[in-house]
Amino acid sequence: MNTRAHTPGPWVNSPGSGDAIISTNHDAIQAEIDRGGPFTKEALEDYGGYVIAESVAPNNKALIKAAPEMLTACKAMRAAINAYRDTDISTMAFFGLLCEGETLVNAAIAKVEGE
């Protein structure tokens, strides 16, 4: 299984650049600075966080910002499906996993659609 890490959320609009989307996860920002990443502290201060995407069309912003939540929702649904394959799981336990996944999916969709 791929364990590639992505920049953790939350991903939000940059207060310093109207067209950029940033991560405000301070641990991720510091880790990027510590490993000598492409952004300096000054650049991070200009944008207000670690830049995820720049020059984003307004109609794509909500979708990009919801990416961390969508990944979490997909992983929850995958866990439910994998649990179903396990013959030892009860119907109620499986239903509980599905409901948890559905809640995450609905929240991610609502974030994208502005609900």
Image (tube, rainbow, N blue to C red):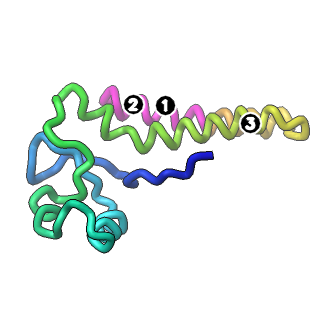
Is residue 35 located in the magenta-colored stretch of the structure? no
Label 2, on which residue? 110
Q: How crowded is mark 3: few (under 14 residues within 10 Å), some or many (20 or more)?
A: few
Q: Quadrant of the C terminus?
A: top left
User: Magenta region: which residues?
Assistant: 101-115
Image side of residue 18 versus residue 53, left or right: left
Q: Do the residues bearing badges 1 and 2 touch, measured as CB atoms within 8 Å?
A: yes
Location of residue 76 by image quarter: top right
Label 1, on which residue? 106
Q: Is residue 39 above or below residue 5?
A: below
Residue 58 visible (yes or no)? yes
Label 3, on which residue? 82
Is residue 105 located in the magenta-colored stretch of the structure? yes
Which residue lies at the image location 83% right of the left edge and 32% below the top edge? 91
Which residue lies at the image location 45% right of the left edge and 36% below the top edge? 107
Q: How crowded is mark 1: few (under 14 residues within 10 Å), some or many (20 or more)?
A: few
Residue 46, image x, y percentages: 9, 60
